Each structure stands twice: as C-alpha cells, then as structure tokens.
Amino acid sequence: MAAPFAVLWDHSHLWGLLLCRGLAALGVDFAPVTCAAVADGALAGAPPRALLVPGGFARRKFAALGPAGVAAIRGYVAGGGTYFGVCGGCGLALTHPEGLGLCSWTRRPFADRLEHLVSGHVRLAVAEGTPFFPAAAPRDIEVPVWWPAGFVPPPGEGGAAGEAGNAVSVVASYAGAGADLMLADIALGAMPQALLGACQERFGLTLTPEFLDGGACVIAGDFGRGRYVLSHAHLETPDSPRANVWLAHLLRLFAPDAGIAGEAVPAWNPAGEPERFADPHLGAVRRDLESVISAGIDSRLLLQRNAWLLGWRPGMPGFSLSNLAAMLAGATALPPTEAALAYWRQAGPEFARLAGGFARRLETFFPAQRLEITLSLVERRAGVEPNLAAERRELFGASPGGGGLCGELAERLDGLLLRLLA
C-alpha cells in the first residue's frame, strides 16, 4: 500500500469516520482498506507501517475478514507490522473464538450490567518509562472512553502496570472517573464521592464500576517480529487535546519518517461544516433525521451529549441514531469522488426511500415509547408492550442495536464514506 497507515474500514461507522478525521487533522497519510481487500492480499507486497483498527463491532469485523483475512493480519504483524486497535479494534486482536489471537489476553466479561454503560473522560495512571506515551507528558491524564470493554490476562500472566518481563505490558490503567463521565444518562463524574458512598451505604447501590479502579485501559506487546498497541481510550476524539497528543506520539513511533506534523484534532460540529457533497437524497434524509432526533429529545428519551454524539435513556436506540446522523454529516462534508458518485447513483435513490419510511415510523415510535414508559410506572406493568418491542427490532435490530432498518441505512452510508475517503 502507498500510504504509511491503513485503516481497517468495515463495521466501524462513526468510529472509523472519527479516526480518519483525526488522522487528517494530524497530517497523516492514510488509506482505508476493507476486510475483503485484506483477505485478497492488500497488506502484502507493499505493507503499511501500521494497520489502524477503529472501534465498532469486533465480531462483525472478524466475520467480514474470514479465515483468509484473519491469516493475512496475523501474517502481516508476525512479519514485522504494527497493529493499533481502538476499543472494538482491541477486542478483535485478543484471544477468543472471534479474535485474531495477536495478544494472549482475552476480553473481560461484564460483571454487571452497568459496566458497558460508561462513557466520557476517565483518569488514567500511565506506566513509568513506557515508550508508548509521550515522555514529557504528565502521567496523570484524562482521556475519553466510549462504552469500553476490558482486558483479562490468562492465568499466570500478570500484567501490573510497567511490570518487566511480561509478554503483555500495561501502558495505562484506569484511575477513576473524569468530570464528564456518564453512566448511561447519569452524570457519574459530577457526583461527589460522599454522595456515591451514601448510595452504597444506605441503599446498597454501587454506581462506579470496579474496572475504573486499576483495570487495564491500554496494553502493548509483541507478536512474531511485529507488535500491537490496544487502547480502549479513543485518542482520536475531537477536541480532547491530551489524548490527541498521545495519538500523534504513537503514530510517530509507528512511522518515524511519515512527517506527522499535527498535535490536535479540532472540535467537530457536523451541523456547521460546509456542504461539499450536495446530494438531494442526503440532504433530505439529514433534515428528516434531525426532525426525528428533536422529537426524541422532546420526549426526554434522547439528549444532545455534544455536537456529534447523542446521549440516551437506557434501552433507547440513541447510538444507532447518533451513528447514522454523524455518517450523513460526514458524507456531505467530503468532496465527491468519481467512485462515490458512481456508487451513489445506484444506491442513493433506494437509500432515500428506505430512510423516508424509517423517519416516518420513528415519528410514532418515540411518543409511543414515552407513553409505554409512563404507563409501566403508573400501572406497575412488567415488560415491554409486544408490538412496540417488535417495532424496535424491525427498526434497530436486537440489543445493543446496529441492525434492522437503521443498520441497512448505515451500511449504505458506509459504502459511500469508503469511496469518499479513498
């Protein structure tokens, strides 16, 4: 590949877009690559200096790679390549039935349902002397995480931060909640410790997940002649300066001669970006989706977390909608390429038709969902109204989402973004 960095594109959606946006802001030369292309040998011949794997659904990435793609990535790293995985890209690299087995560690199972609802900035303790962190930067740092999983070493393989001699080294460990950390729609980071203690003492309610106190967040190790760095911290997050500096340091470490000049990823306000791809289908769907999201916010089921990300009441399909809205905004902000225009001439009309029906159904779904929640509290009803549950499955697929009609729309946008970025 001509570019020093390849971005594994499939099933990353918003997180792939954010990583590519961050790379562009840092002045990094990169190229998106599909799982099918990897399976066909895209990492061989002229291999990239590093394969960057964004967040998203690790299981779907693994399935898209297939046996040939899995073997290709393992061969690339074993031969001297670098694998950098973020969040879902971490899970893909670990050892389990749907992992690449680059790292001997595996995924940490969720001890309780709260653990996968954590998002926002967390405090980290960085290991002394690690080459995977800027030497001049303070070791106590806050970085963003977005619904992270976790790491578990195999029996007998330690992993204390900075411990020498381990095949896997812990680069940084969780050291508590940052000021903006959310637990679902609860502002956990803003709650005083005394209040959290009172909730535990008086009512037995533990709100802070255990992994935030000492669990591994960033790890690194060798595989054959190559190496991997796995980070649950989203260092590409817009307007997170210390995380962005860390990302720039890692990229320079992976490719010292790549001429990486940037240090910061600017804030992203999708609504304020100029429209470079002025397509009537995309424009109409953006307007419909903005109207639907406003209805969800008015129903107190969604909230505007920041300019590019929604928050949501537990159980609501907030991320699926946020993902779709961000991908739409990202597509319209990129200049069209010949490949993108050819693809969209075929895919655009059907996308607009499906999206119109999706928006109309959501106009009813949100008020019905609000009413169902209220009635369940007033009438002490258990469970979810079956017709409403069926509608949600058709629109968003099974929990945690990413499927259904919304998933079909996201996959079509995914194909468009790939061609725009390439």
Image (cartoon, rainbow, N blue to C red):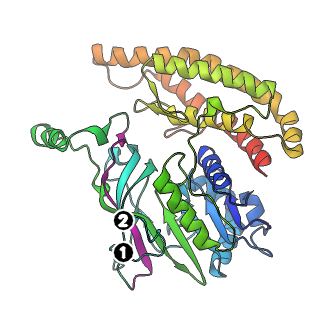
Q: Is residue 379 visible?
A: no
Residue 289 shown in magenta: no
As measured in the structure, the alpha-carbon distance from the residue carrying label 1 to the one carrying label 2 is 8 Å
Mark 1: amino acid: Glu
- What mark, if any, has residue 331 been given in the picture? none
Q: Which residues are magenta?
A: 165-183
Mark 2: amino acid: Arg
The quadrant of the picture occupied by the N terminus is bottom right
Residue with the mark numbered 1: 128
Query: Overall secondary structure of the magenta stretch?
Result: strand
Q: Earlier in the sequence, mark 1 or mark 2?
A: 1
Q: Is residue 375 visible?
A: yes
Q: Residues within 10 Å of mark 2 (few under 14, many from 20)?
A: some
Q: Do labels 1 and 2 touch, CB within 8 Å?
A: yes
The residue shown at (43%, 69%) is: 136
Left/right of residue 251 with respect to residue 408 in the rendered view = left
- What mark, if any, has residue 139 been given in the picture? 2
Residue 53 location, x and y as percent?
61, 60
Residue 272 location, x and y as percent?
64, 30
Left/right of residue 100 with respect to residue 49 in the rendered view = left
Image vertical order of residue 203 relative to residue 13, above or below:
above
In this view, which residue lies farthest toward the left?
Answer: 202
The residue shown at (57%, 55%) is: 59
Where residue 67 sits, quadrant-wise, is: bottom right
Where residue 107 sits, quadrant-wise, is: bottom left
* Residue closer to the observer: 102 or 53: 53
For the residue labelled by badge 2, is the local secondary structure a helix, a strand or a loop? loop
